[in-house]
Amino acid sequence: MHSVSIKDLSVSFGSVNVLKDLNIEVADGEFLVLLGPSGCGKSTLLNCIAGLLDISEGQIFIKGKNVTWEEPKDRGIGMVFQSYALYPQMTVEKNLSFGLRVAGLPKAQIQQRIANAADILQLEPLLQRKPAALSGGQRQRVAIGRALVRDVDVFLFDEPLSNLDAKLRSELRVEIKRLHHKLANTMIYVTHDQIEALTLADRIAVMKGGLIQQLDEPLTIYNKPRNLFVASFIGSPAMNFLRGKITGANQDKAFTAADLTVSLATYDAQEPLTNERDVIFGFRPEHITINDKPGPAGLSCEATVDLDEPMGADSLVWLTVAGKPISVRVDSSRRYLPGEKVHLNFNPAMASLFDATTENRV
Ligand SMILES: Nc1ncnc2c1ncn2[C@@H]1O[C@H](COP(=O)(O)OP(=O)(O)O)[C@@H](O)[C@H]1O
Ligand SMILES: [Mg+2]
């Protein structure tokens, strides 16, 4: 049985169609991340699952039950928002217990659930403090705790870390992952941050303009992006793109742009590579190497270094290839000087080709 099923879901605000005929099946215990730029409909989709929004068309099932018209409180979900909205006059303990007290749960049971959540989220030392005396990360842990004490089947997170600074964000990211390992319940997590998506998700749904562009495991999305949008949205530093044509026959099939020719013999094409087709050749900065000597014919070219950008363990080296700037990720122990002549080695097996018109993977 699927934990959450979304069938043919459409949502409009007035005449604007914000979600378009979405279908998603979330497995029991799965961590699904909804990833996309601001305004693509992530929160709208999450709010539909939570029951906070009326839908125009379609149905939503949670644990096999049609909840399309159920109240939020009857759906077995817990939600954590970007703004933690804790009650400022209440202690952490009272913040955690508020919903349970309203629901009339017996006192002993409330205490049991708070002790459990406090243990999992390391909140014990903070229980008697008020929100003003907590750091941003601690407040967000309390907000997660409020969802946790409700003992729900499905957790919904809407950009829970985006108000925190970079260091706290990466710490809490690890805590959320640990929480998922411990609880093993279904989590649907919205973010515009591709690193959060890649590190947390069992599967990522990449969204744009109310449509799902690709729904796959993180490594599939990273290595085999289905279209140019997914390829450019995922990955930091970003994938390199060169515009050109398919040339040659059979084993000599190649990508050609200006003075550059790269053999496509090892490229895993999804359809026949017809000659003269306009394509975009995409390759990640770590899938190309810099060498002092030329590599095998058809996989190597000469290039001149423009800039060397050290990033700690790695450096990003910028060079000009086929008249366009591209970046290569290298070990930072070797520095490159502007104007230095080097040789690049391509790895077409790890590259992506997109049709220049449809922008779909070929
Ligand atoms: N209540 C609303 N009325 C009208 N338009 C809305 C409303 N809520 C969201 N939208 C629009 O719907 C689109 C998707 O919004 P949202 O789901 O919040 O995006 P995201 O969470 O991906 O940033 C945006 O263009 C937004 O302006
Ligand atoms: Mg949003």
Image (cartoon, rainbow, N blue to C red):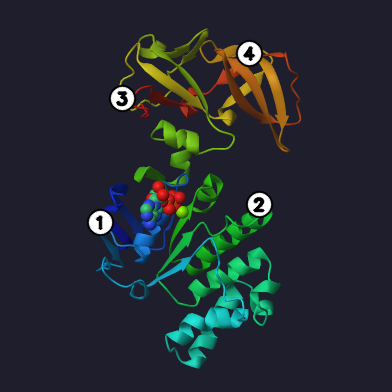
Q: Does 183 sit left or right of 50 as displayed?
A: right
How far across and down, in percent of the image, does residue 171 sit?
Answer: 64, 58
Q: Is residue 128 something that shows in the picture? A: yes
What kind of element bears circle 4?
Answer: strand
Question: CA gap, disc 1 to disc 3?
Answer: 37 Å
The residue to which callout 4 is attached is: 303
Under mark 4, the amino acid is: Ala
| Residue 167 position in % (x across, y down) | 68, 54
Number of the label disc, if any, that sits on residue 56? 1
The residue at the far bottom in this view is 107
Nearest to N terminus: mark 1 or mark 3: 1
Q: Would you say the residues marked 3 and 4 are in contact, meaning their CB atoms lie under 8 Å apart?
A: no
Q: Tell me where residue 12 appears, x and y as whole percent.
A: 29, 52
Report, in whole angstroms, how far the alpha carbon at label 3 lies from the one at label 4.
Answer: 31 Å
Label 2: which residue? Answer: 166
Residue closest to the eye, 112 or 208? 208
- Determine the image quadrant of residue 245: top left
Q: Can residue 253 be seen from the camera position used here?
A: no
Instruction: Kindly state the secondary structure of the residue where label 2 is placed.
Output: helix
Q: Is residue 61 above or below residue 166?
A: below
Residue situated in front as seen by the camera: 315 or 323? 323
Q: Above or below — where is 198 with respect to 111?
A: above
Q: Which quarter of the rendering shows the N terminus?
A: bottom left
Of the numbered discs 2 and 3, the one sitting upstream in the chain is 2
Q: Residue at x 54, y 73 (%)?
A: 145
Asked if marks 2 and 3 touch (Cβ < 8 Å), the reply is no
Q: Which residue is mark 3?
A: 271
From the viewer's perspective, is 24 left or right of 77? left
User: CB atoms at circles 1 and 4 under 8 Å apart?
Assistant: no
At label 1, the amino acid type is Ser
- Of tags 4 and 2, the one toward the viewer is 2
Query: Which comes sooner in the sequence, label 3 or label 4?
Result: 3
